Image (cartoon, rainbow, N blue to C red):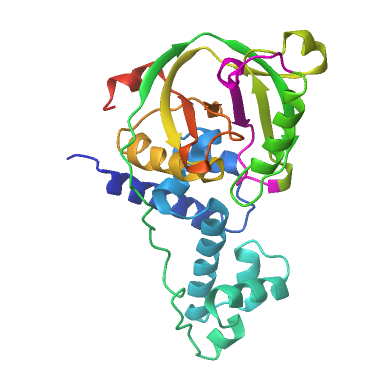
Amino acid sequence: MVDTSNNKNAKIISQVGQYIYDHSDQAISLDSLANYTGFSKYHFNRIFFAATGYPLGEFIQRHKLEKALHLIKQGNHNIIDVALSVGYDSPSSFSRVFKKNFSVTPSDIIQGNLPNNDRAGSLKPRKLKTDQKLLPVWKTLPERKVFGFYGKGFNEQSFSTVAGELFGRLGTMAELLSYTELQPIGVSVDNPWAGEQTQSRFFAGFVEGLSTHHAKLETFKWQAGRWACFTHTGPHDCMWQTISQIYAQWVLPNSIKLKDQQIVQLYLNNPMETKPEALKTELYFAVENSAEKKKS
């Protein structure tokens, strides 16, 4: 039987849901879920979003609350015990989050007032947009030591603000080369959905043009190996949509094994001289050697 994309998505949801149910009284970490499902820690959040349409944190919270709803409806548990069983030390905090999700309080459930809003049912997979065909170009790259700066701050699905500040600093230090010759890259070092977004790090650097300033700069190691290269066309702050489509349309259906390395963004044209909808960015995914043999 062919393991279709829908089957894979359902399997991921089932695996994560069962793990959350079994460990609902604990703080569930990204490391534990990545190890449990066998996915790369760096890519797991993105793969999960591509498979379900939900951020992992929202899914975990909602799954715990669904378990709490089930326990309360059974009538054999008091609210304090239920709150503790799904990881809430404070019954008042539990009741507040419960009402936000189901529009009724745990006490209302005990009194027989069941939720009737559209969020009362179990989470169903959301369909992501698939309006473009995404196929990789395979490249074998040498190791590169890229010089630049690290910054922090992820806002509204994008590192655009911090990236602009970092590239502005680099621009004052770079040699008089064209934008293409500088080969500017950006790297989301941390997964912004795995912790406090304002602390998520971003690296901005030039592959060329900074040789006289190495001592003042930080470095990112762009590792050698086989990389699958995709092209995003459009504004930089919409790049996450293309990345989600790559996971949904290419990684999951073809069982691509990604290395636990960051996605590298290579910017091909100058945003100061190019309309946002015409910007092109190459997205590099590090893959295991066997991945190229799969459908591309």
Q: Is residue 23 above or below residue 85?
A: above
Q: Can residue 23 be seen in this view?
A: yes
User: Dividing the image into 4 quarters, which one contains the C terminus?
Assistant: top left
Residue 276 point in image, percent of width and height: 52, 42
User: 76 and 87: which one is in front?
Assistant: 87
Residue 83 point in image, percent of width and height: 64, 69
User: 163 and 173: which one is in front?
Assistant: 173
- Residue 193 is one of the magenta-drawn residues: yes
User: Dividing the image into 4 quarters, which one contains the N terminus?
Assistant: top left
Residue 217 point in image, percent of width and height: 78, 18
Q: Can residue 196 be seen in this view?
A: no
Q: Residue furthest front?
A: 273
Residue at (40% x, 42% y) in the render? 245
192 sits to left or right of 241: right
Residue at (43% x, 64% y) in the render? 123
User: 24 and 288: which one is in front?
Assistant: 288
**Magenta-colored span:** 174-197
Kindly indicate the quadrant of the structure image that contains residue 143.
Answer: top right
Residue 78 point in image, percent of width and height: 62, 78
Q: In this view, does 54 lie above or below 146?
A: below
Q: How many labels does the image show?
A: 0
- Residue 177 is one of the magenta-drawn residues: yes
Q: Is residue 223 above or below residue 268?
A: above
Kindly indicate the quadrant of the structure image that contains residue 166.
Answer: top right
Q: Which residue lies furthest to the left in this view?
A: 1
